[in-house]
Amino acid sequence: MMIKYIFYFLAFVSVFSALMVVVSKNPVHCVLYLIMCFFSIAGHYILLNAQFLAAVHVIVYAGAIMVLFLFVIMLLNLNTQSEPHKSTWLKFAAAITSGLLLVILVGTLKGSETMVMPLGNPNAGLIKNLGITLFKDFLLPFEVSSILFLVAMVGAVMLGKKEIK
Amino acid sequence: MISFLIYKTILVIVIFAVSLVVAMYSTYGERKIAAFMQDRIGPNRAGPFGILQPLADGVKMFMKEEIIPDVSNKALFILGPCIAMLTACMTGVVIPWGAAITIGGEKYSLQITDINIGVLYMFGVLSIGVYGVMIGGWASNNKFSLLGAIRASSQMISYEVAMGLSIIALVMMTGTISLKEITEQQAGGNWNMWNVVYQPVGFLIFLICAFAETNRTPFDLPECETELVGGYHTEYSSMKLGFYLFAEYINMFISSAVIATLYFGGYNFPFMHDLGLSENLITILGVVALFAKIFFFIFLYMWVRWTVPRFRYDQLMNLGWKILIPLSIGNIMLTGLITLLRQKYYF
């Protein structure tokens, strides 16, 4: 019973903050609402008994990625004067494209309420089970994804390096 | 259910109060130690030996006029110190302050909650701690504050990486990330040493990063009168400034507790099960032992502050990225290698 109320509260917070990300005028406020959204999603993970995922979600998204976002936005010092002028046609086109995306999303998710997820092990999200699954059943994809990270890191270092003449 | 709630509430309040009091008297201790190192007397006016000085400071902070700059972002300006204080107090939840106490046949653990992701929780709270500084510095709408905030947060992010990597080596060795289990593994007997014996490099990296994370000398670059007027809290006055300064002392206390728990055996002390003491007495002595370790590390923070000059900013970044991170990755590899050899040859 309690969990149900917590779920509704978290769902409200995530939807509200996600909406505020789009609606807010001040870019710094947008980022802060996005951080709030990430926290409520971490709360959902905890409700699903996936504590490891929740902690990593907070550390990686709220703690690292959003800090860099905030960094860039604070340094850019965006305000209404420096905002590029958007023509009416541009806004019109943006509304149509995002509306189409909404239609597609609703269309794909419409049939999903009849889909019943097979109930797996409820403790699958605990760190021990997750680690065993990752390193036994999905070892190759896991290692390959680490190469992806390596590529991204090398790319970032290359871009950040001063040009040698 | 009700008794459980009451017990947890009391525990939370006690730990909260203890962190605040320890942080409060750390300010006094810092001034006394500084005075001792510089051959002065230090605060000695309020009460015997100046023991009431922290109270006087607190009253002063509360009584000062509160100024919120007109051009600042008011909501965020107030939110900044709140987050700093909140995250400073949050980590105390997962630290095992002692083993269980038995009252009337019922066991009461002295840890608020033993979640099995203790180390990650601690790390998550640490990574949120950056926001207090960043939001406060930006909301002040002052270029010096913003520069200070950016300095502070880039320093904290950089050292977080090395800190995380140094913990990974420890986690590989202990095989758990619950702080309680890590402590219990370090219980005495059979030449079972504290983790610092097996992870000396990891401990040093962790210690250096803890200094950087709490913005203490030699890493106190975020606060620099000569370059930044003040720091990220230039525009703050009254108790909001007090909260920022106070959060630093709470962080110092909590990080000392974490170091003591991870590397120095937590509430374990030598020969604890060989002296024939009762369970409750061992628990109480364990709490005393833990606090003795914590106070030693708080003293170490102050000792370093009044001994070592500060780094230059580029030196700080070089140390973080070019020395500590490769060193901690090497430490991880070495730990992995030794663990494998141990499994193979059973030593």
Image: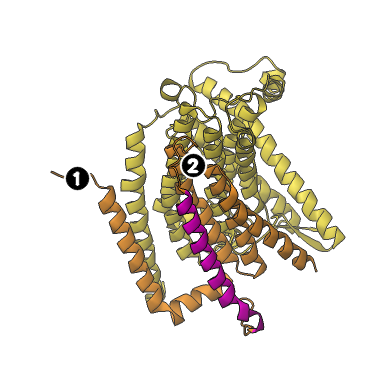
Estimate the x, y position of residue B343 in percent, counting from the top left: 41, 75
At label 1, which amino acid type do we have? Answer: Glu
**Magenta segment, principal secondary structure?**
helix
Which residue is at 73% across, 52% downward?
A: B281
Q: Is residue B338 left or right of residue A88?
A: left
Which residue is at 69% across, 25% downward?
A: B58
Q: Quadrant of the C terminus of chain B?
A: bottom left
The shade of chain B is: yellow
Disc 2: which residue: B213
Estimate the x, y position of residue A75 in percent, counting from the top left: 43, 38
Estimate the x, y position of residue A42 in percent, counting from the top left: 60, 61
Q: Element at badge 1?
A: loop
The shade of chain A is: orange
Q: Give the colouring mode of the picture.
A: by chain
- Foreground tag (2 vs 1): 1
At label 2, which amino acid type do we have? Answer: Glu
Please state the extent of the stretch shown in magenta in the rendering: A88-114
Disc 1: which residue: A163
